[in-house]
Image (tube, rainbow, N blue to C red):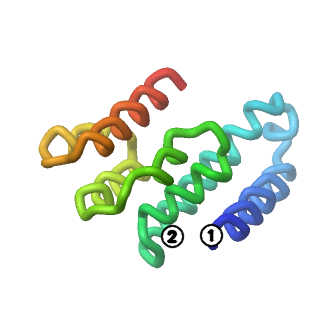
Amino acid sequence: MLFVPLFVALLATHAWKLREKRYRKMQMQEKIEESFGTLQRIAGMLTFIYDPHTVCMHLGIIRGIHPYIILLMIPRSFTLQCLLQSALVHPYLMAALALMSPITFPEALFVTINTLYFLHK
């Protein structure tokens, strides 16, 4: 459901940033990372309208190989919703919140993979 609007937002972000001289001089991978960073901030604002699980899952589908794709296999829970909301702010905030919350094994696995992904990014 959110895949198409997020993909269009990604393309619009890229087109908008092409006006900047600094952005045009970047390598392709740097442009992709910057556009996805902007898309992640947009996704954070979408969580006020949509479920954080849905937003992060569709964000993971758009990004391809990303820890959010694991959300296809993890059932929704209130704790996971809170973790995902904090992950959109910062991944380490999600890890700190997970340390203080009762979470299931799949949720703990997701938190670990997501934190390690951003640690080695």
Q: Can residue 94 be seen in this view?
A: no
Q: Left of 42 or right of it: where is 32?
A: right
Residue shown at 42% from the left, 71% from the top: 51
Q: Residue furthest top?
A: 120
Question: Residue 50 location in percent, x, y?
Answer: 47, 74
Residue kind at label 2, given as amino acid type: Leu
- Residue 56 in sight here: yes
- For disc 2, the marked residue is 46
| Callout 2 secondary element | helix
Please report contact status of discs 1 and 2: CB closer than 8 Å, yes or no. Answer: yes
User: Foreground: 3 or 89?
Assistant: 3
Q: Residue at x 48, y 45 (%)?
A: 70
The residue that disc 1 covers is: 2
Q: Residue at x 42, y 74 (%)?
A: 48
Residue 67 appears at what percent x and percent y? Answer: 50, 40
Query: Is residue 29 or residue 24 the one in the foreground?
Result: 29
Q: Which quadrant of the view contains residue 6?
A: bottom right
Instruction: Provide residue 4's location: percent of width, then percent of height.
Output: 73, 68
Q: Where is the C terminus found, in terms of image quarters?
A: top right
